[in-house]
Amino acid sequence: MVRSILAVVAGFVVASILMMAIETVNSHFLYPELGKLAEGMTDREAIRNLLTGAPIGAFLVVIFGWVLGSLAGGFVAAVIGRRAPIGHALVLGGFLTLAGIANNLMVPPPLWFWIAGLVVLIPAAYAGARLAPRHTP
């Protein structure tokens, strides 16, 4: 039981770190104008307006980060949770999807991003688990 919890938590931490790193690169290096505009912004309507005018590429980089983070997190969850690697990765994917929903509620993106974010996290975590080496009991 402890190993299962550790597997999902470790996968979540790895996924989150990777996602945040890619989003940081996105807002500071690839699309620095968005990062500068968003600094100190607290008004939801101002943030919504900023995101409405954001280039599609900026959103695609975020989706890429979510997929990569979920893939790596699923891999880690599968390696640590040896007995049911796919199960651990799917639980992780569910938690990442809930976190994505929470993120989208706080910073409302375009509808297509909502859909993409909800669709990619669980399959990416599953794919990460499939990439993990198989353990024989």
Image (cartoon, rainbow, N blue to C red):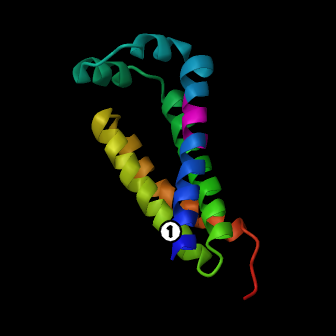
Q: Nearer the viewer, residue 111 or 64?
A: 64
Q: Is residue 45 above or below residue 10?
A: above
Q: Residue at x 48, y 33 (%)?
A: 59
Q: State the image coordinates of residue 127 (x, y, percent, origin top left).
A: 63, 64
Where does the magenta region start and end? 18-23
Q: State the image coordinates of residue 8 (x, y, percent, origin top left).
A: 53, 63
Q: Amino acid at mark 1?
A: Leu
Instruction: State the SS at label 1.
Output: helix
Q: State the image coordinates of residue 48 (x, y, percent, origin top left).
A: 29, 24
Q: Residue at x 47, y 11 (%)?
A: 36
Q: Is residue 31 inside the magenta stretch?
A: no
Q: Which residue is mark 1?
A: 90
Does residue 110 appear in the picture of this structure? yes
Q: State the image coordinates of residue 24 (x, y, percent, origin top left).
A: 56, 27
Q: Residue at x 47, y 16 (%)?
A: 34
Does residue 111 appear in the picture of this structure? no
Identify the residue at the far bottom of this view: 137
The image quarter in which residue 77 lies: bottom right
Q: Is residue 114 above or below residue 8?
A: above
The image quarter in which residue 6 lies: bottom right
Q: Is residue 32 above or below residue 136?
A: above
Q: Nearer the viewer, residue 116 or 9?
A: 9
Q: Please give left or right for residue 135 compared with residue 54 in the image.
A: right
Badge 1: residue crowd in 10 Å (few <14, some 14–19, many ≥20) = many
Q: Main secondary structure of the magenta part?
A: helix
